[in-house]
Amino acid sequence: MKGGTVDLRDLEKAAKRQGWRVDRTKQGHWRFWPPGPTIPPAIFSGTPGDRRAILNFLADLKRKGFRWPPQGEGKKRKGS
């Protein structure tokens, strides 16, 4: 993650560290499978159409239990 932007490769690495499974469909979409068997995967287009697509995908991941930013990599608060 550079300069506050979110990169799909960073999300993939963090997801795998958190126990998620990541694969690609035949159509080129990314599937992020949560560790819980009852939660459906989050799917991301291989060629997103707008600049908000990655942020919308991140919001979907968070709703399914994904933690972002990874521990130790978030912004530091004043006084801590």
Image (cartoon, rainbow, N blue to C red):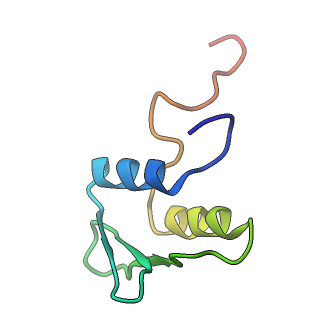
Question: Percent x, y for residue 40?
Answer: 38, 82
State the residue at coordinates (46%, 40%): 70
Q: Percent x, y for residue 58?
A: 57, 62
Q: Residue furthest top?
A: 79
Image quadrant occupied by the N terminus: top right
Drawn side of residue 34 relative to residue 76, left or right:
left
| Relative depth, front residue between 7 and 38 | 7
Instruction: Residue at 69% x, 10% y: name it.
Output: 79
- Foreground residue among 23 and 20: 23
Camera-nearest residue between 50 and 21 = 50
Q: In the image, residue 51 lies at what x, y percent? A: 74, 65
Q: Is residue 10 above or below residue 75?
A: below
Quadrant of the drawing holding the C terminus: top right
Identify the residue at image location x=33%, y=88%.
Answer: 26
Please name whichever residue, 24 or 55, is drawn nearer the observer in this view of the structure: 24
Q: Going 53% across and 42% down the picture, which residue do you hit?
A: 69
Q: Check the image and name the residue furthest to the bottom.
A: 27
- Residue 22 location (% of width, % of height): 31, 67
Say which quarter of the image contains residue 78. Answer: top right
Examine the rendered structure and indicate whether residue 49 appears above or below residue 64. Answer: below
In the image, residue 60 sits, relative to residue 15, either above or below, namely below
68 displayed left or right of 16: right
In this rendering, the answer to whether 3 lies above or below 35 is above
- Counting the numbered discs, the total is 0
